[in-house]
Amino acid sequence: MKRIVIFLAVFIMILGSASPALAASSEQGFYNPGSAADLSITFRDASGTVTSVLEDVDGSGTADTFYPGSDRLTVTFSNAVSGEEYLAMLVRGTSLPTNLEDSKYYDIRQSTASGSSVTFELYPKRITNSIQMTLFITNSNDETVISVPMYYWAGHSAYLIGDGNDDGRVNMQDRVLLTRYIAEWDGVEQEIKKMGAFDINSDGDITQRDRLILSRYLARWGGSWNSYFDQ
């Protein structure tokens, strides 16, 4: 009987100290944004402002500040010089590319300061994978006045690599969609059901390189071209 009582006491202690397991989020959105003096960020979706929740976004076991469904930002820098031009940029990685045509740029917006503040509306449409990026704000002298880390979680939405229209097959219809998306055809984004499926080389962007890989896969080049689709 004494052993049973001890066992029950230990079991109750374990239950009392246990915390619920956290699981990676299935939703997309920004999480764990950096902060800086004179900077405010509002996370939004198509309907309006998104409120943060505590959630283990990436399954690491740590609760993150997550803005579920957020896909755009309203950014205000409140230590600006009135009348001066500023640029706000969302960039893949931690440093500014030297070429404005670089695919690391997810969005670039220019705005003129009114009084001591300047506001930008950023809508990075090309993010397809979970990724780290940086928000930069520069002044008219190309000096960086803001640099804070940003993270985006693309969720666990299942898809077949290359199957952008989500019909269960990778074929020429997907290649046509991908070609039109890269060429920025109007309305093509509504035809793509699984945008992440077109980031074939998983570099966080959809480019001509992805189109080349898909084309050679469909042309049965074999070899390393097939390895992208064996995930």
Image (tube, grey):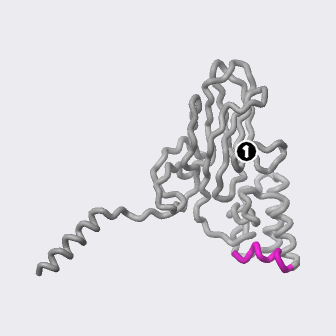
Residue 150 position in % (x across, y down)? 62, 46
Residue pointed to by mark 1:
95
For label 1, the crowd category at 10 Å Cα-Cα, with few meaning under 14, some 14 to 19 and many 20 or more, is: few
Q: Amino acid at mark 1?
A: Ser
Q: Is residue 63 left or right of residue 170?
A: left
Q: Which residues are magenta?
A: 222-231
Residue 90 position in % (x across, y down)? 70, 43
Q: Residue at x 69, y 18 (%)?
A: 82
Q: Nearer the viewer, residue 184 or 26?
A: 26
Residue 188 position in % (x across, y down)? 77, 56
225 magenta-colored? yes
Quadrant for the C terminus in the image: bottom right
Which quadrant of the figure has residue 111?
Answer: top right
182 magenta-colored? no
Main SS type for the magenta part?
loop
Residue 91 position in % (x across, y down)? 72, 46
Q: Secondary structure at mark 1?
A: loop
